[in-house]
Amino acid sequence: MTIYQRYCKESFDRDGRLVDFDIICPEDFNFGYDVVDVYAAQEPRKRALVWCDTEGNERQFTFAELSELSSRCANVFLSAGIGRGDKVLAALKKHYEYWIVSIALHKIGAVLIPVTHMLTVKDYVYRIESADIKGFVCTHQGDVCDRVLEAVKQTGISARLWSIRQEKEGFENLTAAIEAASPRLERVKTSSHDPMLLYFTSGTTGLPKGVIHDHSYPLAHIVTAKYWHHALDNGLHFTVAETGWAKSSWGKLYGQWLVGSAVMVFDFDNFDPKMMMHVINKYKVTTFCAPPTVYRYLVRSGIPEMPSLTYATTAGELLNPEVFRKFKEKTGLSLCEGYGQTESTLLTANFDAGTSVAGSMGVPSPQYRIVLLDRDCKPTPIGESGEVCVVPKREGEHPAGLFSAYLDNDELFREVWRGGVYHTGDSATQDENGRLWFNGRFDDIIKTGGYRVGPYEIENVLMENPDIVECSVVGVPDKLRGQAIKAYIVLKKGLTGDHALEKQIKDQANARLSDYKWIRIIEFVDEMPKTISGKIRKVEQRKG
């Protein structure tokens, strides 16, 4: 029996398709002890992590090695006074130390706060003031340590500061401390209901929210890895994501290890399609997941043969049908889109490559009961927009994988869980085949001339224009229609946005859109207002 099978109940139809899935989570489940240490005891040589960087450095870790290193690291934290419930922020880019630190914190019951290395001093101050942070573990690269040190000084908190691999002023060397620490660690008592992870959202509609997941969260990613990524036992899965974002938890740690797959980590700052393809072929990656942006680059730069690759998935934004077609034409693989939030695990997906349709969010995960509701919380008919909501399968149940709280914001938590249903705030439509189609944030839906229009369909049409690098569609006040459809557009280098080009873009796009979806206004801009994670802040554009 594979480890994951100990923690779930699965039901299949006659064709072998998963139709129902339930988590079985022991009261004291702890990923560090019950997955990593179990592998270390039963299959100590089993490959867990393959890491390389742009400088040609490489490290590979077995579960036995990660078990020992994480226990040593746990002892470093314990000796520093870090314990159950304490919060530790980790800004570790894609360094292999992230996996050691994460497992160590899980083992001692501390709360891991993963963040991107791109945070500013102001961002760190906000997180310090929002959460009672007891420790920081930072990359040795760039000026991350300097920014953290300045934020700590500004807020006046007392916290332990660690950097990795080398000495940094004001920081202890965690690498040296791990080497000197004892590998023996008695199991620390934890509960599956204890907080384990704290993610700050990207803040597309306001200040970042603190999203808390408990120790049952890793188990909810079994479906992510097994049935969406199609990660293989003894395979090698590669998800393109920095460790500061929740997508990293989706594809670089929990579900993959539960189903027996090793994780590939490519430590880079600047994306290079050729180098990424080289990594896939050199290490014989079997399954791959990346945002549509990566696939667009690959299609433009030329896709090489990738004989080891058996499955490819994508999430984070809508996939252009042309990219879908060209990638399949070259590789024979259909890109399978998935959808979820920082607050959740995988909610919907194209689980079967044979039936995957470009632009669709897929079908609801068998792990959840997904419904579309209108603003009166009534189910919406086929083809009409509604909010994506999660209804517990059993009355009073809190579905595994959905966040357990917002940091110090019970009012907001109650708001999104009103009526015993989790409201995602995202809008979608469902077709007669049960597939879901993303429209945008519920607040981003454009109400024009009595119709409701999702911005993503229009953006997809615009992005097929080779002159357009990036676009964003919003609704702006209009006396006649209520709202008019406006497109913000970034052109490729060398082009100037003039009246003639504006007319050309409008004519080409509107010819492919129903008349109530026509673009009425175009504004050419040099760049889009974005969150630190790269998501466009439509809330700012609507004001403009």
Image: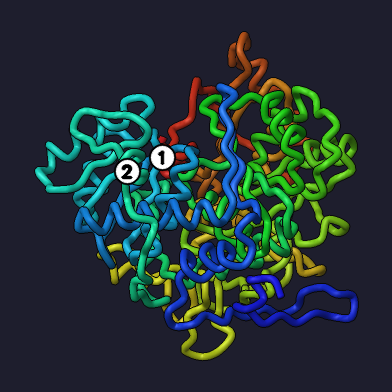
The answer to whether residue 259 of the structure is visible from this angle is yes
Name the residue at 69% across, 74% down.
366
Q: Quadrant of the C terminus?
A: top left
Q: Is residue 473 left or right of residue 175?
A: right
Which comes sooner in the sequence, label 2 or label 1?
1
**Could you tell me the amino acid type at mark 1?**
Leu
Name the residue at 88% across, 34% down.
330
Give x and y (percent) for residue 165.
37, 33
Residue positioned most to the top: 494
Instruction: Identify whether 221 is placed above or below 421.
Output: above
Label pair 2/1, CB-CB below 8 angstroms? yes
Give x and y (percent) for residue 164.
35, 36
Mark 2 and mark 1: span between their CA atoms?
Answer: 7 Å
Nearest to the observer: residue 244 or residue 526 = 244
The answer to whether residue 447 of the structure is visible from this angle is no
Total tally of numbered discs in the picture:
2
Residue receiving disc 2: 137
Instruction: Describe the element under mark 1 as helix, strand or loop.
Output: loop
Residue receiving disc 1: 92
Q: Quadrant of the N terminus?
A: bottom right
Instruction: Identify whether 169 is placed above or below 532.
Output: above
Instruction: Describe the element under mark 2 as helix, strand or loop.
Output: strand
Nearest to the observer: residue 415 or residue 197 = 197
Q: Callout 2 environment at 10 Å: few (<14), some (14 to 19), or many (20+)? A: many
Q: Is residue 286 left or right of residue 249?
A: right
Residue positioned most to the bottom: 395
Q: Callout 1 environment at 10 Å: few (<14), some (14 to 19), or many (20+)? A: many
Give x and y (percent) for residue 188.
34, 71
**Could you tell me the amino acid type at mark 2?**
Val
